[in-house]
Image (tube, helix red, strand yellow):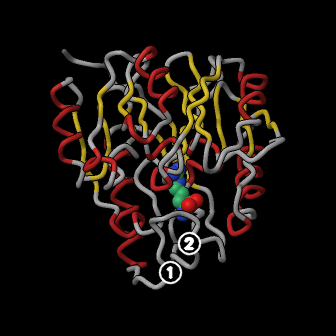
Amino acid sequence: MTMDAISQRYLMCRPTYFAVDYAINPWMDPTAPVDAALAIRQWETLRQVYLDLGHTVEEIDPLPGLPDMVFAANGGTVIDGRALAVQFRDPQRADEAPAYRAWFEAAGFEMHDPKHVNEGEGDILLAGGLLLAGTGFRTAHASHAQLQEIFGYPVVTLQLVDPRFYHLDTALTVLDERTVAYLPEAFSPGSQAALRRLFPDAVLATAADAEVLGLNAVSDGRHVVLPAQATNLAAALRDRGYETIGVDLSELLKAGGGPKCCTLRLRQGKAGK
Ligand code: ARG
């Protein structure tokens, strides 16, 4: 089966000021060394993969003092030409929110301001006609109602239970309009049951895949860009007909991030590109 790739528009932020200076998730150890130059080269490789696939990559200027700003997925949620700005749980990342908001506004998106903590596409993923919304660690459950009001897609709340998989995009990836891949044990029993009902054909990841942030993947419907270390998951995806592209983001992994964290999907309205 050949699947169609959909050309996408992404927002990324060069890791000029990337560092692991604080710990707001279990992956982060401020005493462990980080190779900042290597982080930049790895990020440039990821960007080039998208360009080679024919996608468009926009860039937001990185700001000094905001080492996690490279994780653009947390900058907002952008669907049908509307952008919901973010409100971070942790004060260390708070100043990223207005920077991303200003970028969306300048780019012409219809802006909406958050009423509750929400960390953008880290926890909010459009899957077909549903908005999958994570909660438990970062994004507040109360924000899910606002998502439905702004975007008008049915929202499905998913309860995350493992602190290593603190954002939804570390535990689940959207492959195309119909299918997702996820790690069942990262979710509460009720959320696992809901996922089984919604996606009976989902690809189930193994703990080994998730532990290298293999689920932090970016799919255009045909090509799936994922951490190179997630070899089981890559094989399972190839069995389903996807083409996999492994990338090594070892330095960004030290902050708890992978390819998807570095990549915010910009979705224009129906008339847009
Ligand atoms: N250090 C960052 C944090 O803890 C990593 C964010 C990763 N982003 C993501 N979309 N999962 O907030």
- Whether disc 2's CB lies below 8 Å from ligand 1 is answered no
Could you tell me residue 10's position as x and y percent?
Answer: 52, 42
Q: On the image, which quarter does residue 185 sit in?
A: top left
- Whether disc 1's CB lies below 8 Å from ligand 1 is answered no
79 and 149: which is toward the camera: 149
Q: Residues within 10 Å of mark 2 (few under 14, many from 20)?
A: few
Residue 179, label in figure: none
Q: Is residue 80 depicted above or below 198 in this figure? A: below
Q: Relative to 220, is 231 on the left or the right?
A: left
The residue sitting at 62% across, 40% down in the picture is 135
Are the residues tagged 1 and 2 within 8 Å (C-beta)? yes
Could you tell me residue 269's position as x and y percent?
Answer: 65, 22
Q: Residues within 10 Å of mark 1 (few under 14, many from 20)?
A: some
Q: Quadrant of the N terminus?
A: top left
Q: Relative to 122, is 33 on the left or the right?
A: left
Query: Going from the N terminus, do you reach mark 1 or mark 2 first?
Result: 2
Could you tell me residue 40's position as x and y percent?
Answer: 41, 70
Residue ID for mark 2:
23
Could you tell me residue 176's position as x and y percent?
Answer: 39, 23
The residue sitting at 65% across, 24% down in the picture is 80
Q: Quadrant of the C terminus?
A: top right
Q: Residue furthest front?
A: 189
| Residue 194 visible somewhere in the drawing | yes
Label 1 secondary element: loop
| Amino acid type assigned to the residue bearing label 1 in the image | Pro
Q: Relative to 205, is 121 on the left or the right?
A: right
240 and 60: which is toward the camera: 240
Residue ID for mark 1:
30
| Amino acid type assigned to the residue bearing label 2 in the image | Ala
Q: On the image, which quarter does residue 200 sit in?
A: top left
The residue sitting at 20% across, 24% down in the picture is 241
